[in-house]
Image (spheres, helix red, strand yellow):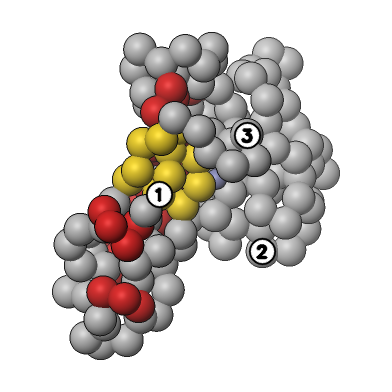
């Protein structure tokens, strides 16, 4: 499918909105990778995001139909990992300093009482962050650190490629 449909260079975000995705998932995306200085399109033909069309506004997936899955997936395309990456209260996690450590992914929007999977470290779980697994209405933001990582990844891997 991607061989037939992909457009643009490695700097062009291709999102495929599909009626079904294998594994009953809402979306998936490739992370940026080193494709060399003047890559042939065949090198990155599989690059891009697959998003369940029913996650878009008007779609029928309750809790996940405000289009925020596409935002989450675009975050991956620009190099972000999940806020619960590593599923641990220690270690590098998502490599972002200003997202609190989180050891479990979030269901729904457990704001009160605040979800805090790593009570021994500073900050409650970043349930409103686009890179958690919360419902669409719960998502509000990326952090400045995530913004910086996206800029860095863009410059390093995609810009001009
Ligand atoms: Zn994800």
Q: Is residue 17 left or right of residue 120?
A: left
Query: Of residues 104 and 24, which is closer to you in this image?
Result: 24
User: Which residue matches tag 1?
Assistant: 49
Q: Is residue 100 left or right of residue 140?
A: right
Q: Nearer the viewer, mark 3 or mark 2?
A: 3
Q: Nearer the viewer, mark 1 or mark 2?
A: 1
Callout 3: 10 Å neighbours few (<14), some, many (20+)?
few
Q: Position of residue 53 (x, y in %)?
A: 40, 28
On screen, 96 above or below 118?
A: below
On screen, 146 above or below 113?
A: below
Farthest residue toward the bottom?
37
Q: Report the residue at 26% width, 68% height from top.
A: 10
How many numbered marks appear? Answer: 3
Callout 1: 10 Å neighbours few (<14), some, many (20+)?
many
Query: Of residues 16 and 66, which is closer to you in this image?
Result: 16
Counting residues from the start of the chain, the first of labels 3 and 1 encountered is: 3
Secondary structure found at label 3: loop
**Quarter, ligand 1:** top right
Secondary structure found at label 1: strand
Secondary structure found at label 2: loop
User: Which residue matches tag 3?
Assistant: 24
Q: CA distance from mark 1 to mark 2?
A: 25 Å
**Residue contact between numbered discs 3 and 2, judged by CB atoms under 8 Å:** no
Q: CA distance from mark 3 to mark 1?
A: 15 Å
On screen, 79 above or below 37?
A: above
Counting residues from the start of the chain, the first of labels 1 and 2 encountered is: 1
User: Which residue matches tag 2?
Assistant: 92
Query: Of residues 90 and 47, which is closer to you in this image?
Result: 47
């Amino acid at each position: 499918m991607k061989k037939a449909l992909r457009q643009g260079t490695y700097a062009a975000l291709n999102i495929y909105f599909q009626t079904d995705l294998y594994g009953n998932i809402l979306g998936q995306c490739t992370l940026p990778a080193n494709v060399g200085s003047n890559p042939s399109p065949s090198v990155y033909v599989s690059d891009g995001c697959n998003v369940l069309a029913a996650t878009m506004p008007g779609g029928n997936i309750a809790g996940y139909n405000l289009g925020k899955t596409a935002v989450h997936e675009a975050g991956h395309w620009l190099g972000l990992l999940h806020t619960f990456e590593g599923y641990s209260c220690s270690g590098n996690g998502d490599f972002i300093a200003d997202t609190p450590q989180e050891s479990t992914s979030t269901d729904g929007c457990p704001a009160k009482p605040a979800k805090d999977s790593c009570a021994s470290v500073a900050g409650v779980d970043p349930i409103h962050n686009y890179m958690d697994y919360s419902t669409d209405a719960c998502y509000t933001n990326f952090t400045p650190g995530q913004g910086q990582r996206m800029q860095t990844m863009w410059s390093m891997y995609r810009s001009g490629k």
